[in-house]
Image (cartoon, rainbow, N blue to C red):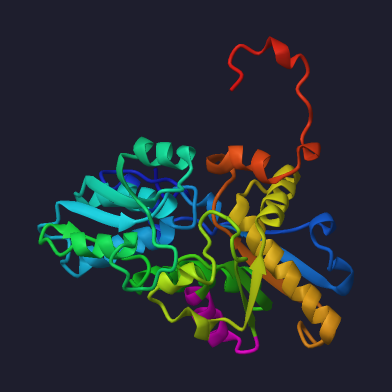
Amino acid sequence: MGNRQNVFEGSSAIRDFLDPGKNTYLPLVELPSTLNPFAGDNVRIFAKLMNMMPLGNVKAAPAFNMIEEKYLNGELEGVRKIVENSSGNTVSSVALVARHFGINDIQSYVPSEISWHKLLMLLFFGVEPIVNVEPENPDEGDPNSGVSKAKKDAEQDDVLNPGQYDNQANPRAHERWTAAQIWDQTDGKIDVFCAGLGTTGTIIGNSRYLKAKKPSLQVVGAMRAPDNYVPGVRTEKLLKLVGFDWGKHVDTIERVETALSYQLSLEMSRSGIIVGPSSGLALAGLQQYLGDLKARNGLDELGDKETGEIICVFPCPDGPLPYLDEYFKYIDKSHFPSIQNEDLLLNKP
């Protein structure tokens, strides 16, 4: 087929398709003023659509990078099984990538509060879930955590634990692909980067690359507020399980509540940017940061001195479909249309 772009062919076609370095740049889409309350302050907010990756989520990048680095280092020789601690996107992505490196047996420790839809997703992708009751006040070395149990399992010679919470191939993936794309797409004019704090690989990799290019860049980490739920993102307490020294890569921390995360995700999706609740959390964290800064000192310290524009970017990790039922739990029913002739439904839950 010659040099036609975005064509993957031959015996390695799917493996090449899953390689972020062999794909076109992911979209960077500016939000309209309806989703940007600071548009009047010359703030421009862009969504980096990581959910447009071949596997539909941000974890496709570190999953490929972790497996590829193990392969290049000869660490996949003799490996029969992969075990990870993940409730969805990471281990699903690892499973799809690993099959192209000859490993088909994939297990994952999942928290007991995992949604049924996410559990079905794991089964759909051929991942064997191991339900685990996570400790209430965990730390990095807690033997009862899924993270520690996955590491323990990997003490067997034929078992590999990629270790997304302390494997430097995770943040390196975002240095290698995500941040480099954002830098090019903004012509180096990015002023604020905000991302949710989960494994923290996204924020570390982007912070390393972008701050090396532009030291004045402000990096905002958005975490779940205490006792609030948002899939893929952690509370301050749960971040203790993460082995990365992520704090030194973040300038400001914002704590975001569940309802707002789901609400902003719904509003973005209805505007045509179809993204999940962790995307809503990142946008909420960015908005809180800008609001607090404006109230304290104004926004003049940010942005281009000539144009006055302030360029902000936040990544959108995945889409809303795995969490669809949760929107009706966390968002008031007044935000949804009614169902006409509902009594005629044959398969009403």
In the image: residue 184, left or right of residue 17? right
In the image: residue 239, left or right of residue 193? left
Identify the residue shown where x is 53% and y is 54%: 231
Identify the residue shown where x is 67% and y is 46%: 330
| Quarter placement of the N terminus | top left
| Quarter placement of the C terminus | top right
Q: Is residue 27 visible?
A: no
Place residue 185 in its image quadrant: bottom right
Image vertical order of residue 177 relative to residue 189, above or below: above
In the image: residue 264, left or right of residue 252? right
Identify the residue shown where x is 71% and y is 12%: 343
142, 265: nearer the viewer:
142
Q: Is 207 in the magenta?
A: yes
Q: Which x, y percent locates residue 56? A: 49, 48
Q: Which x, y percent locates residue 310? A: 77, 76
Q: Which x, y percent locates residue 217? A: 64, 83
In the image: residue 174, left or right of residue 325? left
Q: Is residue 65 visible?
A: yes
Instruction: Report the magenta residues as a range.
Output: 204-216
Image vertical order of residue 164 relative to residue 261, above or below: below
Q: How many labels does the image show?
A: 0
46, 132: nearer the viewer:
132
